[in-house]
Amino acid sequence: MLIPNYSLLIAIQTLFFLSVGARLLESPPEKPPVARRALFIFGDSTVDIGNNNYIETVPGNRADYPPYGRNGFFDGPTGRFSDGRVIVDFFAEYARLPTIPPFMQPCIQLHDGVNFASGGAGVLPETNEGKAIDLHKQLNNFKAVQRALSKELGNAKAKDLIQNSVCFFSIGSNDYMGGYLGSPVMRNAFSPEEFVAMVLGNLTQAIQTIYEMGGKRFGFLSLPPLGCLPGTRLANSNNTVGGGCLEKASMLAMAHNNALSTTLTSLAHILSDFKYANSNFYEWLQDRIRSPSEYGFDESLSACCGTGPYRGLFTCGKAKHYELCETSDAYVWWDSYHFTERIDEQFARELWNGSSVGPFSMEELFFSDGGKEITMDGIIGDA
């Protein structure tokens, strides 16, 4: 287990323990000139676009079979845990980049970025160990990409590409859901506060590693209310009438988000030229769960695809008999733990240039540099 023990992480953790702990766009974001920044993606099934297609894992950590991908945007299932696209696909579109390829896919082009995410992955190596590509291994894969770029482009150009890139993180849910709540060993060894601190310490170490490699711009998808996923509602239905949200799971997500916010604020003060876009996904999604009709949804408790109460059993497509909704656009949840393309698109727009993101937006990370606008040919003038 990686447990950072140097002074910067201690200072950040101390700040955390001292801390107390939407809008929709009606049209696609306006597209600025062509971006020259690559996009590198680290995370779990929320942003995995097919890496798990190439590894040995459990069936629940793969999505390369029907009805995944049912909305027809891609030519069949791709490994995305969705009816179609996921949030990083929209970032690539808005940034005028091609679809970012999964690292495990053979013969990929590296110049526009790489997706390292893996369904089931955690920040901690022990989370789903041997069943997913954890964050530490994803960092090693990023280093391999850096070496390949240096060999192809030369050290100077490769360094420039990394320095001008945007690195996006969406990870942590598996650490809390399976790695902690699902592990009596971890619960006995660590208090919730200690476990959150350990997860954030390892995540901070990963951010620092990328920063030391040249990365300066980071985006983060904060954790949703984990207790309100269809799968956790199903698990909680044995204990509460109606299967309400599992509060201890949502509390862990909230504590993680508070710690992440404190950590990023500290890093921005400590690290030169460190820029980031952090999201308030918890409250943003909670609003849609509580009042789906106000945001154009019909159903926010049950999944579109699955079995059992809330369609909360993670058997979409793998069971002999599973239920499938007629129109997934009407649903917040695609399966027991994942979102529909429509939610991902809405939040991608919000992160791109909405009010639930700060201190920078994803658009600013891609298209501004000291108040100037970026194109493939370089800085072209004041923004």
Image (spheres, grey):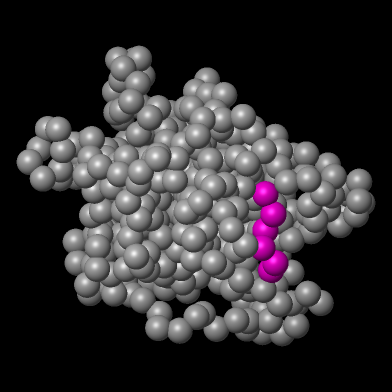
**What kind of secondary structure does the magenta stretch mostly adopt?**
loop
100 within the magenta span: yes
Q: Which residue is most to the left?
A: 241
Residue drawn at 24 percent across, 68 percent down? 298
**Percent position (x, y) of residue 124?**
50, 29
The mark total stands at 0
Residue 154, above or below 380 = above
In the image, residue 212 sits, relative to residue 98, either above or below, namely above
Pick the residue in front: 56 or 132: 56
Residue 355 figure quarter:
bottom left
Tell me the quarter of the image containing the C terminus. bottom right
Which residue is nearer to you in this view: 105 or 103?
105
Q: Nearer the viewer, residue 324 or 136?
A: 324
Residue at x-position 14% and y-position 33%:
238
Q: Nearer the viewer, residue 325 or 154?
A: 325
Q: Is residue 89 above or below residue 30?
A: above
Residue plotted at (36% across, 76% down): 24
Residue 186 occupies which quadrant of the picture? top left
Q: Is residue 10 magenta?
A: no
Stretch of the chain drawn in magenta: 97-102
Q: In this view, does 311 lie to the left or right of 84?
A: left
Residue 330 lies, in percent from the top left, at 32, 68
* Residue 321 seen in the current view: yes
Image location (x, y in percent) of residue 249: 27, 38
Residue name at image x 62 percent, y 29 percent:
56
Question: In this orientation, does residue 8 appear?
Answer: no
Residue 340: percent from left, percent from top: 41, 60
